[in-house]
């Protein structure tokens, strides 16, 4: 029996559902980070006494920077998930871009946007 070169349409549909769920959550989290940066939720020190404003100013700057980094990271994650959906449509999803072999289902369920098998990822680190 020959080795599988791609996942079946049924398997791809399973992965598509996993990715869509993760994408929805990622977009929600991205909005939360964005609101933290822009004070879109209205929950800041602007409406409190000047004393609190001075004391929390440093913490606010740090938390905005952290929220900015998290938002950038989340945006990259969203782009990776969207790219995975394109690979599903092209029926190339789950194929390692280095070895050309199928990435194990277990890995894809955990990291659905993976484009490398563990074997290829380890070789990259060498």
Image (cartoon, grey):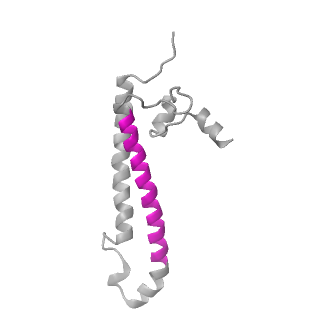
Q: Position of residue 78 (x, y in %)?
A: 39, 49
Q: Residue furthest right?
A: 126
Residue at the spot x=52%, y=29% of the render? 104
Left or right position of 97 against 126: left
Q: Position of residue 86 (x, y in %)?
A: 36, 37
Residue 18: in sight, yes or no? no
Q: Residue at x 69, y 41 (%)?
A: 126
Taking 15 as reference, is 49 above or below it?
A: below
The majority secondary structure of the magenta stretch comes to helix
Q: Residue furthest bottom?
A: 50
Q: Is residue 84 magenta?
A: yes
Instruction: Say if 55 sits above or below 114 in the image.
Output: below
Q: Is residue 36 above or below residue 110?
A: below
Q: Position of residue 89 (x, y in %)?
A: 34, 32
Comparing 73 with 56, the one in front is: 73
Q: Which residues are magenta?
A: 59-87
Residue 44 magenta-drawn?
A: no
Give residue 45's position: percent from left, percent from top: 37, 81
């Amino acid at each position: 029996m020959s080795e599988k070169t791609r996942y079946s349409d049924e398997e791809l549909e399973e992965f598509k559902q996993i990715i869509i769920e993760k994408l929805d959550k990622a977009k929600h989290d991205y909005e939360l980070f964005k609101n933290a940066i822009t004070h879109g939720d209205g929950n800041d020190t602007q409406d409190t006494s000047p004393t609190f404003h001075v004391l929390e100013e440093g913490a606010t700057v740090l938390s905005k920077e952290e929220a900015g980094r998290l938002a950038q990271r989340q945006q990259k994650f969203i782009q990776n998930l969207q790219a995975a959906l394109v690979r599903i449509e092209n029926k190339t999803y789950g194929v390692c871009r280095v070895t050309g072999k199928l990435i194990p289902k277990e890995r894809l369920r955990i990291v659905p946007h993976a484009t490398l098998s563990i074997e290829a990822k380890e070789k990259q680190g060498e």
